[in-house]
Image (tube, grey):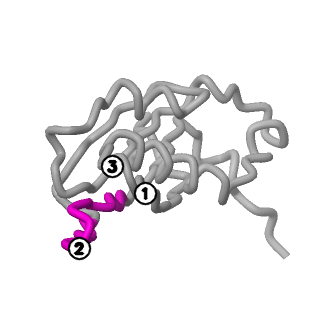
Amino acid sequence: MPMKRIILEMGTGNDLYGENYTKAACRAVQDALHHSSLILFRSLGVNRDDMRITVNVGVQQPDQIDAATVAAEIPFGTVTVNVVTGGLNVVDEDNGTTSVVATAGIAVYLDLPEARFVLPAG
């Protein structure tokens, strides 16, 4: 049975002074996670570790991301991190610094039988 996407959350994170892309990405993931309360696992008796999670992160310098560190922000399931060019760098020319802004989209997939979600007629 194919996995079905059941959750999509988005978040943003930044590192204002350290120019650390991984830190900004982790904060974006935490922002997305804090928008969710996933009671459906308890309500449906689904094991949270059965989730397949895809984290898509956008930053201006994708090669600066430690994907394993970003994946460790997700407490359950099997996590895949994809890093792409995106986000935003805000340059402060007067002080010679760059503030890094990362965006994250977290998609959660489960193997759920169709019959589990059929509503009774009437």
Residue wearing tag 1: 14
Tell me what residue is drawn at x 81 percent, y 63 percent.
120
How many residues crowd mark 2 within 10 Å: few (<14), some (14–19), many (20+)?
few
First in sequence, mark 3 or 1: give its number. 1
Residue wearing tag 2: 94
Tell me what residue is drawn at x 61 percent, y 49 percent.
33
**Side of 4 relative to 84 (left or right):** right
Q: Quadrant of the N terminus?
A: top left
Residue 64 in which image quadrant: top left
Q: Quadrant of the C terminus?
A: bottom right
Q: Which residues are magenta?
A: 88-102
How many residues crowd mark 3 within 10 Å: few (<14), some (14–19), many (20+)?
some
Give, as a three-letter code, the residue at label 2: Asp
First in sequence, mark 2 or 3: give its number. 3
C-alpha separation, residue under disc 3 versus residue under disc 1: 16 Å
Give, as a three-letter code, the residue at label 3: Asn
Pinpoint residue 105: horizontal percent, then vertical percent: 41, 56
Residue 70 in which image quadrant: top left
First in sequence, mark 2 or 1: give its number. 1
Q: Nearer the viewer, residue 105 or 20?
A: 20
Instruction: For the residues labelled 2 and 1, say whether their Cβ atoms are less than 8 Å apart.
Output: no
- The residue tagged with tag 2: helix, strand or loop? loop
How many residues crowd mark 1 within 10 Å: few (<14), some (14–19), many (20+)?
many
- The residue tagged with tag 3: helix, strand or loop? strand
Q: Nearer the viewer, residue 122 or 53?
A: 53
Residue wearing tag 3: 56
